[in-house]
Image: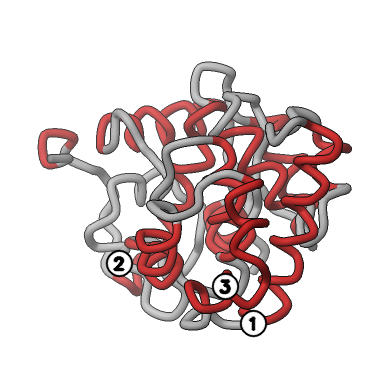
């Protein structure tokens, strides 16, 4: 059975609940500058945030600028990130990206999608994360969690990540758009998980359109007082 698209009223309630649950959502990657965020997101492809944080918590005190990482050299960089999957190719991309940042942007992070996507190893999703999280732009980085939540709930039904991204940008009210990326990732990571979603604990199950949610413990109405 295809999932019906959420109504405007459902979407409004959906995000009001997520906002009440997490008033100030943040990425779980550790960073203290746009550069650190860019490198962390680049390293996080096909890796967990936990594994990236373990590596960058040791790397950034030593090298947290483009020039400092260039000074480490590729072999020096690999020593810090070798516990992360695909670290060899990621190290090459980080070094190449740092060289471009030094040569073209005085070591700073560009603030347009086109410039970011021109950096080695930086795709649309990574660019969207940086634009949203570092620069507060209304972009939507659709990862596996957001793709699943969008399709499963009826918030944004799409055959591919680009369709889901465009749908989300279209339907999410402006008051929620900046933080919605983090709300959706965290909801997908900890509640609306892939195999056994925690519908019985879900604060938005009554506005969700997934037909199977009741099989996983969803109830017809939610007591908002239980959000905390």
User: Considering only order in the chain, which callout, 3 or 2, is on the residue closer to the N terminus?
Assistant: 3
Q: Tell me which residue sits at (47%, 26%) in the image.
A: 12
Q: Which mark is residue 198?
A: 2
Q: Nearer the viewer, mark 2 or mark 3?
A: 3
Position of 171 with respect to 32 (left or right) is right
Q: Nearer the viewer, mark 1 or mark 3?
A: 3
Q: CA distance from mark 2 to mark 3?
A: 43 Å
Q: CA distance from mark 1 to mark 3?
A: 16 Å
Q: Secondary structure at mark 2?
A: loop
Q: Secondary structure at mark 1?
A: loop
User: Is the residue under label 3 in contact with that under label 1 (CB below 8 Å)?
Assistant: no
**Could you tell me if residue 186 is visible in this image?**
no
- How packed is label 2: few (under 14 Cα within 10 Å), some, or many (20 or more)? some
Residue wearing tag 1:
86
* Front-most of residues 195 and 208: 195
User: Considering only order in the chain, which callout, 3 or 1, is on the residue closer to the N terminus?
Assistant: 3
Q: Tell me which residue sits at (75%, 65%) in the image.
A: 93
Position of 198 with respect to 86 (left or right) is left
Q: Quadrant of residue 31?
A: top left
User: Considering only order in the chain, which callout, 1 or 2, is on the residue closer to the N terminus?
Assistant: 1
Residue wearing tag 3:
76
Tell me where residue 97 appears, x and y as whole percent.
76, 53
* Front-most of residues 42 and 16: 42
Q: How many marks?
A: 3
């Amino acid at each position: 059975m295809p999932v019906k698209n959420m109504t405007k009223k459902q979407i409004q309630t959906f995000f009001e609940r997520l906002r009440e649950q997490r008033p100030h959502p943040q990425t779980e990657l550790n960073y203290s500058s746009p550069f650190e965020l860019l490198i962390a997101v680049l390293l996080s492809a096909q890796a967990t945030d936990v594994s990236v944080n373990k590596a960058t918590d040791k790397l950034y005190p030593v090298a947290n600028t483009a020039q400092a990482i260039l000074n480490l050299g590729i072999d020096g960089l690999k020593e810090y990130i070798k516990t992360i999957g695909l670290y060899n190719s990621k190290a090459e991309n980080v070094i190449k990206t740092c060289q471009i940042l030094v040569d073209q942007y005085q070591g700073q992070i560009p603030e347009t999608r086109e410039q970011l996507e021109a950096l080695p190893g930086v795709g649309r999703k990574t660019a969207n994360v940086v634009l949203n999280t570092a620069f507060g732009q209304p972009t939507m980085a659709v990862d596996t969690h957001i793709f699943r939540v969008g399709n499963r709930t009826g918030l944004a039904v799409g055959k591919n990540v680009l369709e889901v991204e465009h749908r989300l940008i279209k339907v999410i009210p402006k008051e929620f758009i900046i933080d919605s990326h983090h709300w959706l990732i965290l909801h997908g990571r900890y509640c609306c998980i892939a195999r056994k979603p925690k519908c019985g604990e879900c604060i938005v199950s009554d506005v969700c359109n997934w037909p199977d949610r009741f099989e996983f413990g969803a109830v017809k109405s939610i007591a908002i007082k239980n959000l905390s």
